[in-house]
Image (spheres, rainbow, N blue to C red):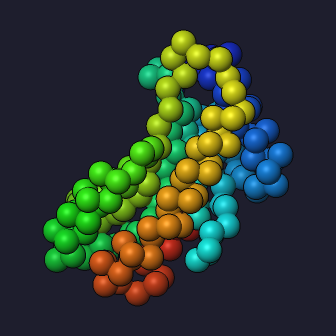
Amino acid sequence: MASITSRSATFYTMLCHVLEHNDIPYERIDDWCVTCLVSGREGDIRLNFTVDDSKMLVTLYAPTVRHIPQERLPDLSLAVCMLNHQLSDGAFCLDMVNGLLYFKLTVSFYNSEPSEDIYTYMLSIAADTVDRYRHRLRTLTGQPERYCLSEAS
């Protein structure tokens, strides 16, 4: 992997600062990725941030449901499509091969200056959206609770 540039390093450092400022425990996976847990109404929500210097993007992934049975995928894919149509930022993504559902929010830092506000916004949107819809999405999977936690990797 290419070395991290000063621009992406600034965004990465800023992300860690925002998490610390909001008392959100996090783990640095490497120079490009941070994972953290935020509290939701129905339990913790895992948020994984990556900084992609080559594409000049910051992406947040929030695993929502895992081990979705194949027979549930058609109904769930329709529900995800309808739900995404209502969202103003971010989207739920369905990995039909691996039976995974996650929320994804991407922000470009092309021609922009670093801002802590963008991370606060990403945290807020992702946590609120996952918290608001995960119970309904879980119901469609027909899976026991242990397969549906956002803490899933």
- Which residue of the protein is positioned furthest toward the top in this rendering? 111
Please name the residue shown 79% across and 38% down the image: 17
Question: Residue 74 location in percent, x, y?
Answer: 16, 68
User: Which of the 4 quarters of the picture holds residue 121?
Assistant: top right
Residue at x 65% of width, y 17% of height: 113
Where 130 sits versus 13, above or below?
Answer: below
Q: Nearer the viewer, residue 87 or 96?
A: 87
Residue sitting at the far bottom: 144
* Corner quadrant of residue 38: bottom right
Nearest the viewer among 62 and 82 is 82
Q: Residue 65, how many percent across, how many down?
A: 41, 69
**Left or right: where 59 falls relative to 94:** right
Q: Position of residue 45 (x, y in %)?
A: 59, 64
- Work out whether 67 lies above or below 120: below
User: Picture coordinates of residue 56 (x, y %)?
Assistant: 50, 22
Q: Quadrant location of residue 81? A: bottom left
Q: Nearer the viewer, residue 147 or 84?
A: 84
31 relative to 63 in the view: left or right: right
Taking depth in this image into account, of 124 and 15 the one nearest to the observer is 124
Q: Residue at x 66, y 61 (%)?
A: 37
Q: Is residue 21 above or below residue 76?
A: above
